[in-house]
Amino acid sequence: MSTPARRRLMRDFKRLQQDPPAGVSAAPTENNIMIWNAVIFGPHDTPFEDGTFKLTLEFTEEYPNKPPTVKFVSKMFHPNVYADGGICLDILQNRWSPTYDVAAILTSIQSLLDEPNPNSPANSLAAQLYQENRREYEKRVAAIVEQSWLNFQDEDEGEDMKKDT
Amino acid sequence: MFSDIKAGDTTPTHNHSSVRDWIVGDACTIHYTVMEQQHNAQESPTKPSEYDPDINQDELIKAQEKQIAEEIKANTAMIGSLDDLSTLEQEYSNDPVYSGKVKTLLPKYCNVRRTRPDGNCFLRGFIFAYLEYCIHHRDELARFKKYLEGSKEELFEMGFPKFTTEDFHDMFMEVVSDLEGSGSVDRVEAVCNDGGTSDYLVVYLRLLISSHLQKNAEFFSFFIEGGRTVEEFCKQEVEPMYRECDHLHIVALTAAVGVGVRVMYLDRGEGAAVASHDFPEDSTPVIHLLYRPGHYDILYNKA
């Protein structure tokens, strides 16, 4: 059944394919257009560089009137990301505009990585380290960047094993 | 079709293929596990407790807001039926201030149409009442269509994202063209009560307001509270859905679209009569709205 939300999500997907923004990509899951998987690549010249961070976007029938629920699936260490991967970002809450699409959401989250707002912390340790001990902060970020590759490698091995059997 | 996905130019080569696997959903087992865990967590009863920094507060607030919105949605149509104004009198039978003021409306107005109090009531009331007016005034519908056609480019010039703005614009044009052909009040009622269509109209009106405010930022900046710029005000109070319309929104919308609106203010303010205000000032109103603190309904003039 085509609803306004689904129609718009198909449009968003078409646009992502035709005009893909740098450093992010996303697609609906195979059997549910309301749930998307995405990857954000850590921006150059930031502690997040080379990270490949997985996220999920969960839309409701109220999209685009209401934002999707966006969560990091990859482990994240960031002042504005909760332990469960939830993201504290104004455009995903009270500054959401129906003119944002999936590409806009992901590029905003990508910029958030290097431009945290330590005044509304979702991870108080990350916020504290970001303000008081940048070296330690960057060390922790480096750890989750490495972990983000491992996630993909694990899957590759898993895939290979499946192929072997 | 998924093979067309291009990762950004920052893709480290060593994991390119698995990145694609993740995205196209071949490897979403991790994702589903996470989703299930969240789902289970939501179902377990949670008692209100002190602030816990580990709990995602945004999610809790969102869930509560959603519950309230669902209740309103279940109880009120976006645009209600045409009711006799005496129903308003009955609402306030125990309230001498309000019932006294409602009585002063009776000589001028005969009917009221209630709108859903979801923060979009002014805009939904406005567009319903205006399109209904246009059904009986075809020349006005033609003028509005022409204005709408031109408004798209104007929004692009103001920097609104082309891709999504166009979507809202096209839907609005479709509705207007459809009314041109086979318009009836029933049709307007159906369109404005169809969730998807109705909300798209409201979104586009919000963009028109935002554009008008920003285009005249120098003037409007004097009326914005809290030390915000006009742009910030638009991002916070105009463009997001479900955000109530204030004086400033109404001034901007009526000026942008060129449609006169009279608002009757039913509140506990001084005087026995209901205060009224016309937007834009000195215009001839074609739409009459009833304001009660925090909410707008549609009023119908006695013929």
Image (tube, rainbow, N blue to C red):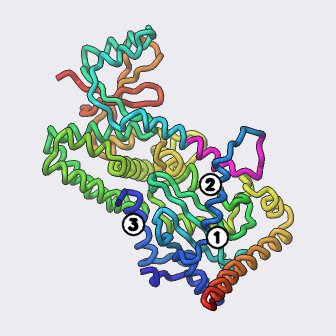
User: Where is B7 relative to B246, above or below?
Assistant: below
Mark 3 vs mark 2: same chain?
yes
Write down the residue under mark 1.
B30
Q: Position of residue A13 (x, y in %)?
A: 44, 71
Mark 2 vs mark 1: same chain?
yes
The residue at 56%/75% (across/down) is: A24
Tell me if mark 3 has few (under 14), some (14-19) or many (20+) residues whose alpha carbon lies within 10 angstroms of its own: some
Q: Position of residue B276 (x, y in %)?
A: 35, 23
Task: Determine the image quadrant of residue A105.
Answer: bottom right
Where's the C terminus of chain B, which quadrant? top left
Q: Is residue B236 magenta?
A: no
| Amino acid type at mark 1 | Ile
Instruction: Kindly give the residue lying farthest to the bottom in the view shown.
Output: A164
The residue at 35%/60% (across/down) is: A2
Q: Residue B239 carries which label?
A: none
User: Where is A8 relative to A163, above or below?
Assistant: above
Task: Determine the image quadrant of residue B88.
Answer: top left
Q: Where is residue A121 in the image (x, y as percent from the top left)?
A: 74, 54
Q: Distance between the residues labelled 2 and 1?
A: 14 Å
Q: Using the image, name the chain to which the residue with label 3 belongs.
A: B
Q: Using the image, name the chain to which the residue with label 1 belongs.
A: B
| Amino acid type at mark 2 | His
